[in-house]
Image (spheres, rainbow, N blue to C red):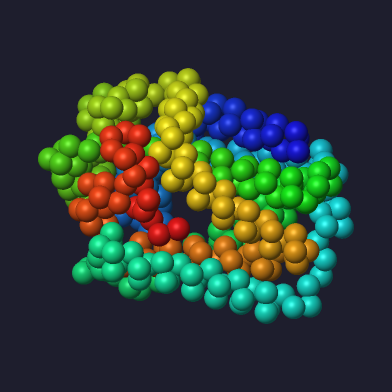
Amino acid sequence: MMRIALYLVSVLLLGAILAPGLYFSGKWLAGLLVSFKQADTPVIGWIAKKLTLHEFDSYYNRAFLISALGLLWPFLRWMGISRNALGLRKNPLWLADLLSGIVIAGGILTIMGIALLQAGAFVRRPDAGWDSVLSQALLSAAGASLVEEWIFRGIFLGVALRTAKAWKAIVFVAAFFSILHLIQAPSIDVKDKKQRQTLTRMEKQNWTRLATTRANDPAKTDWVVDPSMAQFAPSKINAGSGFAMTAVIFERNAKPALFLSEFLTLFAIGLILAAARVRTASLWMPIGLHAGWIFVNTLYMGATMTTRALRDGKFNLGTGDNAIPLIGTQLK
């Protein structure tokens, strides 16, 4: 299990190192594509727009993902991993396990969602685009369940089971699963209502100007970043910005309220998924559970929106910065 911890530290270090370079490369490429009049070219124009509109928080998250995937193969070679060593067996009931997992997780979250609507924490979104929401839910459920179960319950839990008792391995990997999911950069977008509206108009109508200005004089676009995150404004990004963002993430996650509402929720989910994998010696049940969870959560969040009561803390335990939200802004 120590090697898994070393893998996490390595991913954090490499991600922090890569993030600034990835950011500068993305902004440079966006400006270059716009200067060559490629903004309206299919695919290329879409890429240029995405590179332009994403700020350092998004680039940090992508750098972390690239690091995690890039170091996975060396980690596997280091561990000498094979299918048999992971403790996985061929499952003749794979389809039944898969469908059971989807129905169980999806059914429980659906009941929770209805209860939260009745409680006044969420309301139906009047402008929900069902085609878009449904396709996003399907893609997210399929992608996340297959990739994450293969990595967490397949590889990491398999490695942990080789060196520890089952319950210790389950707890360790569930905690590892939670920690990795919490390593997400907080949004740095400007929160002032008027500036937000101005930025939204530029993103829709004149994003090419934003790309050109960012490439030529980054300081002129510093206003797109919220003052509370001024250290990550376009003109302030430097080689150490990735480590600065990592520090912000750990400081944010150290707050008791976030720990109780986010970490423990993900930890409980990780325990269930790991227990299902150990019990069946197969990934099909946890894949089904994970897919059902992601599908209903994504569908629910696209079809509903939070109420003022939830945002104002009506469902919190306590008040102020240390208030513990009994109901989060996502269904989960």
Q: How far from the left and from the top, in percent, is residue 173?
A: 67, 46
| Residue under the point 28% across and 64% down | 119
Indicate whether 30 appears above or below 232. below
Indicate whether 220 appears above or below 260. above
Q: How far from the left and from the top, in percent, is residue 301?
A: 35, 62
Q: How far from the left and from the top, in percent, is residue 20?
A: 47, 28
Q: Toward which corner of the image does residue 277 lie, by quadrant? A: bottom right
Q: Is residue 89 left or right of residue 264?
A: right
| Residue under the point 83% across and 42% down | 163
Indicate whether 55 appears above or below 142. above
Q: Is residue 261 left or right of residue 85?
A: left
| Residue under the point 28% across and 35% down | 320
Q: Is residue 286 left or right of residue 187?
A: right
Q: Is residue 19 left or right of residue 57?
A: right
Question: Is residue 185 in view?
Answer: no
Q: Nearer the viewer, residue 164 or 95?
A: 164
Residue with the most extreme left position: 194
Image quadrant occupied by the C terminus: bottom left
Q: Toward which corner of the image does residue 303 lie, by quadrant? A: bottom left
Q: How far from the left and from the top, in percent, is residue 18?
A: 54, 30
Q: Nearer the viewer, residue 208 or 141?
A: 141
- Number of on-image labels: 0
| Residue under the point 49% across and 73% down | 107
